[in-house]
Amino acid sequence: MRRKNAQLSFSKLAAVWFSALTVVTAVVAIAAASGWFVATVTAGGSPMAGNWVGMCQDGRPFVELRLEPAVRGYGGTISLGNVKITSQPGAAEGSCTVNDPPSAEHAMKVAKAWMVGDTLTFDSDRGQEYEMKMTGRDAAKLRFVATNQDESWFGLRRVK
């Protein structure tokens, strides 16, 4: 007995491929239009995304941080003001006074950002390393790693 091999013609293959592509495109379009995909990415996978500001005890901003989801963690910018650290080295909470606030003209790119547990570690494009931890939905703390100054944690809040 001889079995007849079923042959798939090019037109049948093209029809199946087009149908599958149409279904996938429709699902993605519906998900994007409903905001499901965007909300899932920003809420679930990127809890630290957003615009953050750190204020000194004199009520003026000393850091502005913009974090956005990237393929391997986060991207964005960090801008530091000219500040005087007033806390003692290693204090639980850092304190400072602002001489000049941060500005967009002096912003540095966030480079090499990665998560380890609940801590986001990132470098600026000038080599300074930072660590950030969430302390609430719109609250976090930031520290400057391996500086010859203070490595205390400074408060941040997410701005809308």
Image (cartoon, grey):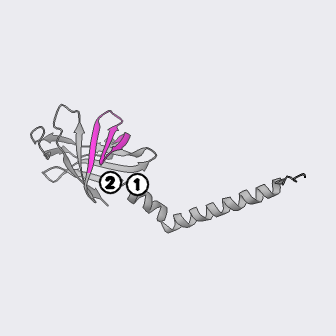
Say the numbered circle drawn on residue 45: 1
**Amino acid, disc 2:** Asn
Does residue 53 sit above or below 25 in this rendering? above
Verify whether residue 23 appears in magenta. Answer: no
Other-residue count near label 1 (Cα within 10 Å), few / some / many at <14 / 14–19 / ≥20? few
Residue furthest to the front in view is: 1
Q: Nearer the viewer, residue 10 or 122?
A: 10
Residue extending furthest toward the top: 148
Quick check: 22 above or below 78? below
Position in image of residue 98 (x %, y %): 16, 45
Task: Identify the residue at horizontal 29%, vertical 53% (top origin).
Answer: 52
| Residue 21 position within the rendered picture, expressed as x and y whole percent measured from the top left | 67, 59
Asked whether 122 falls inside the magenta stretch, the response is yes
* Residue where numbered disc 2 is placed: 51
Name the kind of residue labelled 1 in the image. Gly
The total of numbered circles placed on residues is 2
Q: Which of these two is toward me, 49 or 11? A: 11
* Residue bounds of the magenta highlight: 108-133
Say which quarter of the image contains residue 20.
Answer: bottom right
